Amino acid sequence: MLAGEKNKTIIEVTVVGKDRKGVVADITNFIFQNGGNIEKISQNVVRGLFGMQLEASFQQTNRKHLDEGLKDLAKKLEMEIKVHYQEPDRLRNVAIFVSKEPHCIERILKASEKGEIFANLAVVIGSEDTLKPLADKAGIPFHSVAHTDQAAAENKILQLIDQYNVDLIVLARYMRILTPNFVWRYPNRVINIHPSLLPAFPGAYAYVQAYERGAKIVGCTAHFVTEDLDQGPIICQESFKVSDSDTLESIKKKGQQLEAETLFEAVKLYLENRLEVYWGKVFIHDGKKKK
C-alpha cells in the first residue's frame, strides 16, 4: 500500500439530466479545484438524456463543503447530482429487489444468517407483495412499489435507496426493466442474475428459448446492470448439461438452483472488494482488494 492511500477517500459522483454543453468540464473542474484526483469517468447520452459517472480520490475531504458545492453546481447546470462516499470501515447496506420467485432472495438471506456474507440487508423492494413474508421473517423492511407508472415507480425507489443509504442493489429475479435514468445513478452497484449464458437467450423467457432450440448446455449469468438490457459486464457464469430426459420444468428447476448460487457468489465477491471493472470487463482479484 502506497503512503497516504490508507486515509484516501473515494467518492462516486453521478450526474443525470437533459443533455447540455459544458457539464463534464464544470464537474471535473470542481473536483480538481477541491484537491481531488479523477480515477474513472464515463458518460453517455440516450435520447437527449445525459448520464455521467465519475470516481475521484481525495487525500483530505470536507464533506460539507463538497456536498454544498455539488448542490450549487446541480442548480446551475439544472442537473441531478448525487454523491456516494466509499467508507471501507462501514458495513455496507444492501437492497434486494424481488418479484415473485423466492429462490435467489432465500439464498442471500441464508448466506447472511450463516455468516457467509458480511453486509447489512437494509431493505427489500418488491414489484408486488408476494415475498413480503420472507422479509418480515428476516426482520428486514419491505416496500412494495407497483410499476403502473414507470417514472413514478423509479422515483419512489430512488427515495428508498437514499433513505436506506444503499451501497449495493441486488436484483433477485426482479422482473422489471430499470431505465437508464435509474441505472446511471448506480454504476457497477446493481447486480442482476439472468437465466442464460449471456449473450445467448436474452430477455425474460431464456429457459423456454433454450428448451425449444434444443440447447445441450444451459446456465445463468450474474452481471452488472447497464442501460443496455442484459449486456452489462459479466461477473460469473455457471452451467449444466441438458439430458434427453429433461423437460422444460426440470430445466427450470435446475436453473433456479444454479441462479441462486451464482447470484450469491457475485454478491459475495462484490462485498469482499474483489471486483474491478475496466472497459466493460470484470476482473476478479484473488484476494481482498487493497484499500
Image (tube, rainbow, N blue to C red):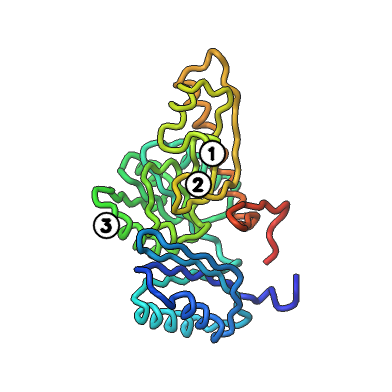
Which residue is disc 1 drawn over? 198
Residue 49 lies, in percent from the top left, at: 37, 63
Residue 54 lies, in percent from the top left, at: 52, 69
Which residue is disc 3 drawn over? 152
- Contact between labelled residues 2 and 1, with CB atoms less than 8 Å apart: yes
Task: Give the residue displayed 50% in from the left and 66% down from the top.
Answer: 53
Q: Give the amino acid type for the residue marked by disc 1 in the picture.
A: Leu
Q: Give the amino acid type for the residue marked by disc 3 in the picture.
A: Ala
Q: Give the amino acid type for the residue marked by disc 2 in the picture.
A: Gln
Q: Horizontally, is 156 left or right of 291 in the view?
A: left
Q: Look at the image and tell me in which quarter the N terminus lies.
A: bottom right
- Contact between labelled residues 3 and 1, with CB atoms less than 8 Å apart: no
Q: Whole-Å distance between the Cαs marked 1 and 2?
A: 8 Å
Mark 1 or mark 3: whose residue is earlier in sequence: 3
Which residue is disc 2 drawn over? 231
Q: Whole-Å distance between the Cαs marked 3 and 2?
A: 25 Å
Q: Secondary structure at mark 3?
A: helix
Task: Give the residue displayed 59% in from the left and 74% down from the top.
Answer: 38
Q: Secondary structure at mark 2?
A: loop
Q: Horizontally, is 21 left or right of 128 in the view?
A: right
List the single residue furthest toward the left.
148
Q: Nearer the viewer, residue 209 or 254?
A: 209
Q: Secondary structure at mark 1?
A: loop
